[in-house]
Image (spheres, helix red, strand yellow):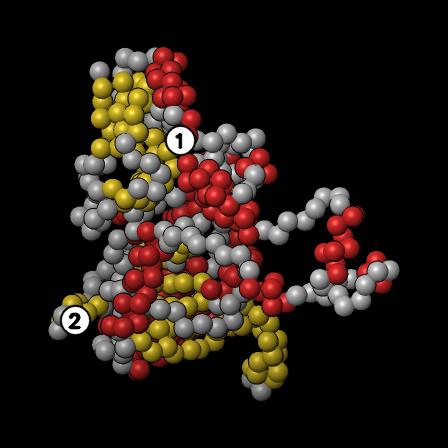
Amino acid sequence: MLIEVKVPQLPESVSEATLMTWHKKVGESVNRDENLIDLETDKVVLELPAPQAGVIVKIVEADGATVVSGQLLAQIDTEAVAGVAAAAPAAASAAAPAAVAAAPGGAAMPSAAKLAAESGVDLSQVAGSGRDGRILKEDVQAAAKAPVVPAAAPAQAGPVLAKSAPAGGAALASTPPAVNVAGLLADRPEQRVPMSRLRQRVAERLVMSQQTNAILTTFNEVNMKPVMDLRNKYKEKFEKEHGVKLGFMSFFVKAAVAALKKFPVVNASIDGNDIIYHGYFDIGIAVGSPRGLVVPILRNADQLSIAEIERQIADFAVKARDGKLALEDLTGGTFSVTNGGTFGSMMSTPIINPPQSAILGMHATKERAVVENGQVVVRPMMYLALSYDHRIIDGREAVLTLVTIKDLLEDPARLILDL
């Protein structure tokens, strides 16, 4: 019996998706619930499991295709045998050899084979970058642009060098040829790569944020020694007790929540001509991933312990790395925290994540000379940045919010005592 594999119902906020890479080929057997292909939306990557066990007899949409909810992607024969099902595609390929050109490094796609024939590129000398070593059109283009260097042809060395240097004869043997800079720069290679849906969405939202918000940033610095001392004292016991490492992000989340409680407008958002004050604290944590920047949400962060915050952040990091973040992990949020210091940033002006009205930027901790009680001492210092929407947040609230965060981090006992 033939079973149709269709695009599942996408979330209401997602209109279409892009097929990434098929994990199965025509003629291969699949098990029920085995992942067939990943669907990339502008927010998350969704897995498409096989509805029934069987053999894939037809793939309708190839890698990179744009699809919508309910669109047919493939067919599975629940009664077929993998070897028999593969015979038909193999016969079809034999009947149409022009579809794929053979090459030692892998098969060449039709467009690549055509371009190679037109440009005189030897496919046997081209390394394929496609799946299973397939030679793509881009591979042929790169090979056509690459300079041809004879492997061992001393007889040709004279004429080639004669074009590069004014001297001739014996002088050419010891004098390196002059570099033709103009010619070299005129043929610089380029690679055109389409944006992923996530990157397109990130770009769209960041531009929208810059265009619609009146973004202003206020700065301060915090002495990280109290938090670092506390962490160093208890990190081993903490990990043994809770099964997760004690980092710094949990202290910043706790301090941010305490500050937002004192200045609720910083936790608010704009809807038309109205200000929406949120009675909850859903904190977005910016996380880098192979696909780009994502901001999973810590729900009800005010109700979470430091251990629970660290555990959820660690879970988000793993999910982001493996592309397993769900749509609900990324939806909502009333305030965000981003840590550019992970990559060595000393100072930045983070962009607000709409429809939020503020974002806290952490940076690298560096030892600096500071004055305490009239004495110059060395302390591990971090610059903090709070970007805020000046349409609803005045400078007073923004500055006092950042000062509150600073004060709590410099006396972390207040976070535990709720002072």
Looking at the picture, which amino acid does disc 1 mark?
Ala
The x and y percentages for residue 135 are 49, 38
* Picture residue at 56% right of the left edge, 33% below the top: 105
Q: Residues within 10 Å of mark 2 (few under 14, many from 20)?
A: few
The x and y percentages for residue 51 are 26, 25
Against 108, residue 263 (above or below) is below
The x and y percentages for residue 416 are 39, 61
Q: Label 1, secondary structure: give it.
A: helix
| Residue 262 can be seen, yes or no | no
Looking at the picture, which amino acid does disc 2 mark?
Ile
Against 200, residue 386 (above or below) is below
Judging depth in this view, the residue of 334 and 106 nearest the camera is: 106
Asked if the residues shown at circle 1 and circle 2 are in contact, with their CB atoms under 8 angstroms apart, the answer is no
- Give the numbered dot on residue 99: 1
Can you tell which quarter of the image residue 251 is in?
Answer: bottom left
Q: Label 2, secondary structure: give it.
A: strand
Judging depth in this view, the residue of 184 and 14 nearest the camera is: 184
Judging depth in this view, the residue of 289 and 64 nearest the camera is: 64
Can you identify the residue that label 2 sits on? Answer: 275
Looking at the rendering, in which quadrant would you find the C terminus? bottom left
Q: Is residue 349 left or right of residue 171?
A: left
Q: Is residue 108 left or right of residue 276?
A: right
**Depth-wise, is mark 1 or mark 2 nearer the camera?**
1
Residue sticking out furthest to the right = 170
